[in-house]
Image: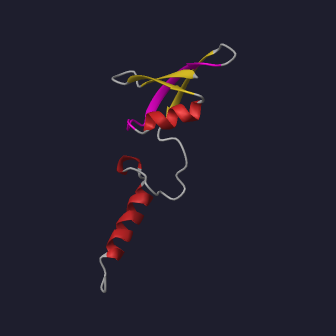
Amino acid sequence: MKKFTFTDNEEINEVKEAKGFKQAVKDFQRNYKKHYVRVMWTSDAGNDMDVEIKVPMGRKKRGIGVPEPYMTPKMKKLAEEKKSKKQGYGR
């Protein structure tokens, strides 16, 4: 298990323990809604890694279950259209 340190150089400074980078990022982004986060860890070869990533990281193909702060303008428009169609006659 590797230790990943997430920080935004302001208030967030959290350490997550996971098998891999992607698992650690997905676990971290469940709780925090910042857009850019710095990740630091030590690789298997012993090198110190330091990467700045854009969160949320992962698949956004359909926009299902995407939280409001992360929705693109196109996703927001589709969600509003879908909501307005449900309020039609006969339902």
32 falls in the magenta region: yes
Specify whether 85 is left or right of 74: left
Residue at 52% from the left image edge and 41% from the top image edge? 57
Does the stretch in magenta take in 48? no
Residue 58: quarter of image: top right
Number of residue marks: 0
Picture residue at 55% right of the left edge, 49% below the top:
59
Apparent side of residue 84 relative to residue 44 in the rendered image (left or right): left
- Please state the horizontal and vertical placement of residue 27, each as a whole percent of the image: 47, 35
Furthest-top residue in this view:
46
**Placement of 62 over or under 22, stated as above or below:** below
Q: Position of residue 43 (x, y in %)?
A: 64, 19
| Residue in front for this viewpoint, 74 or 42 | 42
Q: Is residue 79 above or below residue 28?
A: below
Quadrant where the C terminus lies?
bottom left
Residue 12 is situated, as x and y percent measured from the top left of the image, at 37, 25
Q: Quadrant of residue 73?
A: bottom left
Query: Start and end of the magenta stretch?
Result: 31-43
Question: Could you say where residue 48 lies in the image, as x and y percent from the top left?
Answer: 60, 15
> Residue placed farthest to the right in the image?
45
> Which quadrant is the N terminus positioned in?
top right
**What is the quadrant of residue 46 in the picture?**
top right
Residue sitting farthest toward the front: 1
* Residue drawn where x is 56% and y is 19% of the image: 41
Name the residue at the bottom extreme. Answer: 90
